[in-house]
């Protein structure tokens, strides 16, 4: 286990061992899949120890993933992997029975997996797998303590292909390029979440936020977004309680810029923002986002993003919004 904080030094006591069972399919039938060399998409069942069975126990879960090939060889495929889902841990923080578990305080947690993976095909149906990945368990700061568990793995495996997929003749499409200052999409996203602050076992506070966003896809694999964020974090009312506060005074206003990886209507987002107004400064000046958004054809926008201050989770943004005058960027030739 990677002890990313000094207060976690006592937890990394054992070697990590894990097992995975994955089912995946190579996507060849979508317009955008050609741009990404026909990625793999699937689901993984996961289980491992967490580096300290006495304090942390074991972790189990299931997550969806997508793998982007870097090569086109029929004998060897090298990919980068991104996965997210839900998992459970068997031991959590307890003031009496498990006070040293500063990493996990809830049984149900999010799982995030980032990695690289290679497939070496011995025969069309049989392949050997080697990989390096980082698996993360966290509750997104919905309850403290929540330092999370980061686990680096070197993996070896075997893959069996039930049916060799035939290449399909797709209708040719092209990406419509437009000048930088034209055809930006405007969205409004409302966010609802909650979080717990120290001391442990304390009250959970709601969070309300609104993001006014401009976003655009410049190339088949390149997108960008700019947002103005207005955040009402009710826990700030209890930050330095000796200072009088109002609902208006605790409002945080920030500017955000992010990089998008577009997959048709689905896109990954990663980026950084800075607070323009943050009167009481309970956290850092800068904040970060990593997550996903799904754009429906009718304009509805679904949002699931982790907001953090560097490596410290702030809260999970559960959001729903609307994109005005949404138009896809792919058109038939």
Image (spheres, helix red, strand yellow):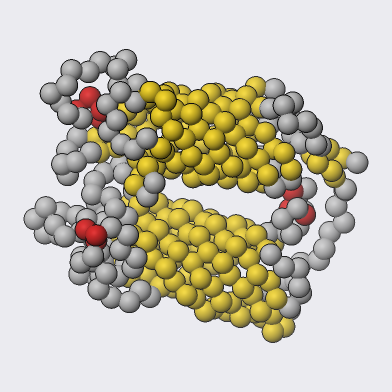
> Which residue is located at x 72 percent, y 83 percent?
123
Quadrant containing the C terminus is top right
The x and y percentages for residue 102 are 22, 55
Q: Is residue 214 above or below residue 128?
A: above
- Which one is nearer the viewer's eye here, 333 or 310? 310
Q: Is residue 278 left or right of residue 186?
A: left
| Whether residue 75 can be seen here | yes
Corner quadrant of residue 78: bottom right
Quadrant containing the N terminus is bottom left
Q: Is residue 244 left or right of residue 115?
A: left
Q: How many marks?
A: 0
Q: Is residue 153 above or below residue 308?
A: below
Which residue is the extreme one toward the left?
A: 96
Which residue is the extreme one toward the bottom?
A: 122
The x and y percentages for residue 221 are 70, 47
The x and y percentages for residue 158 are 57, 79
Q: Is residue 139 left or right of residue 40?
A: left
Corner quadrant of residue 135: bottom left
The x and y percentages for residue 218 are 72, 39
> Which residue is located at x 74 percent, y 59 percent?
37
> Which residue is located at x 65 percent, y 60 percent?
68
| Whether residue 316 can be seen here | no
Q: Is residue 140 above or below residue 131?
A: above
Q: Is residue 119 above or below residue 223?
A: below
> Which residue is located at x 48 percent, y 29 percent?
255
């Amino acid at each position: 286990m990677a002890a990313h904080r000094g207060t976690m030094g006592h937890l990394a006591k054992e070697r990590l061992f894990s097992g995975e069972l994955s089912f995946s399919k190579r996507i060849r039938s979508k317009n955008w899949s050609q741009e990404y060399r026909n990625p793999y998409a699937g689901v993984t069942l996961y289980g491992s120890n967490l580096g300290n069975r006495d304090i942390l126990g074991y972790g189990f879960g299931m997550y969806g993933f997508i793998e982007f090939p870097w090569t086109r060889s029929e004998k060897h495929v090298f990919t980068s992997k991104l996965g997210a889902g839900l998992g459970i841990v068997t031991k959590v923080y307890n003031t009496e029975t498990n006070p040293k578990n500063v990493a996990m305080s809830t049984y149900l947690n999010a799982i995030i997996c980032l990695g690289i993976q290679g497939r070496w095909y011995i025969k069309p149906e049989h392949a050997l797998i080697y990989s390096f990945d980082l698996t993360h368990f966290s509750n997104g700061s919905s309850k403290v303590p929540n330092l999370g568990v980061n686990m680096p793995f070197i993996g070896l495996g075997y893959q069996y292909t039930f049916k060799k997929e035939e290449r399909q003749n797709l209708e040719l499409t092209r990406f419509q390029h437009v000048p930088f200052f034209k055809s930006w999409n405007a969205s409004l996203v409302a966010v609802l979440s909650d979080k717990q602050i120290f001391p442990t076992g304390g009250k959970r506070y709601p969070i309300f936020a609104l993001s006014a966003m401009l976003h655009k896809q410049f190339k088949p694999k390149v997108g960008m977004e700019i947002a103005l964020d207005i955040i009402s974090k009710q826990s700030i009312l209890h930050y330095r309680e000796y200072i009088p506060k109002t609902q208006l005074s605790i409002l945080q206003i920030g500017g955000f810029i992010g990089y998008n990886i577009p997959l048709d209507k689905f896109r990954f987002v990663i980026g950084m923002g800075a607070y323009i107004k943050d009167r009481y400064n309970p956290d850092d000046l800068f904040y970060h986002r990593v997550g996903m958004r799904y754009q429906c054809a009718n304009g509805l926008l679904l949002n699931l993003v982790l907001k953090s201050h560097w490596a410290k989770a702030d809260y999970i943004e559960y959001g729903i919004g609307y994109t005005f005058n949404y138009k896809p960027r792919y058109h038939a030739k």
